[in-house]
Amino acid sequence: MVLAFVDRYSRWVGAAAGWLIYRRIKIYSRSLPPIALAMVLSTLLDPSGRSLIHDGDFILFYTGGRFLLDGRLSALYDFAAQQTFQLQTLKLTAEQFTPFNHPPHTVLLYAPFTLAGFDAGLMLWTLCGLAALALAWKLLRSELAALTSYSTAALTLMGFCFYPTIAWLLANQNSALSFLLLTIFYVHLRRGGDLTAGVALGCLLYKPQLLMVPGFMLLLNHRWRALGGCLLSASLWVGVGFLLNPDATFDYLRGMPQIAELPFLPSYPIAKLHNIYGFCILLFGGVLPVAVVKFLAALLTLAGLALVYRCWRSSSWLPATRTWDLQMAATLALGLMISPHLMFYDLMILLLPLTIVWSHYAQGCNGRALDGDRLLVWYALVYVAVFVGSYLSLGMLQLGPALGWPRFAVQISVPIVIGWALVVHRLATKNELA
């Protein structure tokens, strides 16, 4: 029934495709980098003295890495100790405190970037992120024939026409590494290298929520070598972290329920969450009890997993075929929405499924981009939704109470990305690609 609704709706919005000519698509997509540059300059020139350097998430990475190098892992999840460190070492204000709440083994990843101080470490972190982004595009270019007409540098630069890529850079986050690891996962699965693909997937354990749906997909298709590789690399991460300091591992496990409660706190930037869990909190968190909201989120998460199951139920595992590529793209997109935690900058990973599908439509249709019809409109909807979704949600959260309404908002990116994935799945099952 869901697929039938999406199919009918996509036919209706397909009437708008005539407006999306190549010239307009280029103008609107290329307008984002100048907008981002203006955002950066306005922040750097902010008279309050706040800057991107002291607002990004590299603060928490630096904190975790320094706690490892300073031999303070026993206090890794002591937030008072973290705050004292940031106030004294980084000269931040209390409002800028950014707690380290990643798994303990991740300090191994962050520690090398703390050796030369904060500013130098941030520069190196950014350069490594850009290198990871370029390497991911290089791998995709070598795998998807439609990308060979573009250089790796051009593909990397074009990626910044997608707002979450800009958001990743501004937030100093690790999304580029996630994009690279999932690209390695996809490319090696496509080549039949299941073990390597699984090892790459297991390396994502610094964001374990991203493992859930790809792992579920591998289980559905009985890809035991890939699952074994994933378990091997993930176990190594956890094992090394445990050997470094068992107390830190137990502290993290004990604190996981509190981490899950963070989105319900008034100070949490819930408008920046772009997943099913965040969708439910935004929509129902101000009108329903917390337990009910969690129950609804769990039901929708199970429904999402059921959609992934449906994607692969009647499909054969035939890597590098058109149907397999489309099913994989739909699964990767659904996996982001089903993920228990996904912030706006991690939406840059959508570039992977978007590119996979685009590679089968690179020539367009009747002089128009993509299929020239409904898929084109769904791409446009995704492009706009990930750009304005957080701002719309924040506006709704502020407007509702001002009008005397309950506090609620709709994260439009979630249903739109899910709709895009279902349309791609429908195209795969109907084999509608020419």
Image (tube, rainbow, N blue to C red):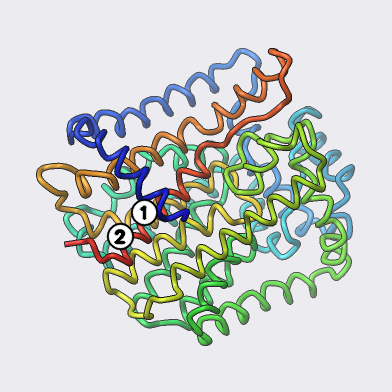
Q: Name the spot of residue 17 as percent of width and height, x first.
A: 23, 37
Q: Name the spot of residue 83 as percent of width and height, x first.
A: 83, 39
Residue at horizontal 55 percent and vertical 27 percent from the top: 391
Q: Is residue 101 left or right of residue 215?
A: right
Q: Is residue 219 left or right of residue 375?
A: right
Q: Which mark is residue 423?
A: 1
Judging by the rendered image, the residue that carries numbered circle 2 is 427
Tag 2 secondary structure:
helix
Residue at horizontal 86 percent and vertical 45 percent from the top: 79
Q: Are marks 1 and 2 in contact (CB under 8 Å)?
A: yes
Q: Name the spot of residue 278 as percent of width and height, x first.
A: 65, 43
Is 424 in front, or is 292?
Answer: 292
Residue at horizontal 10 percent and vertical 45 percent from the top: 366
Q: Is residue 390 above or below residue 198?
A: above
Which quarter of the picture shows residue 379? top left
Measure how far apart labels 1 and 2 are at the Cα level.
6 Å
Is 387 in front, or is 370?
Answer: 370
Residue at horizontal 41 percent and vertical 69 percent from the top: 186
Q: In the rendered view of the protein, which quadrant contains the C terminus?
A: bottom left
Q: Amino acid at mark 1?
A: Val
Which quarter of the picture shows residue 432? bottom left
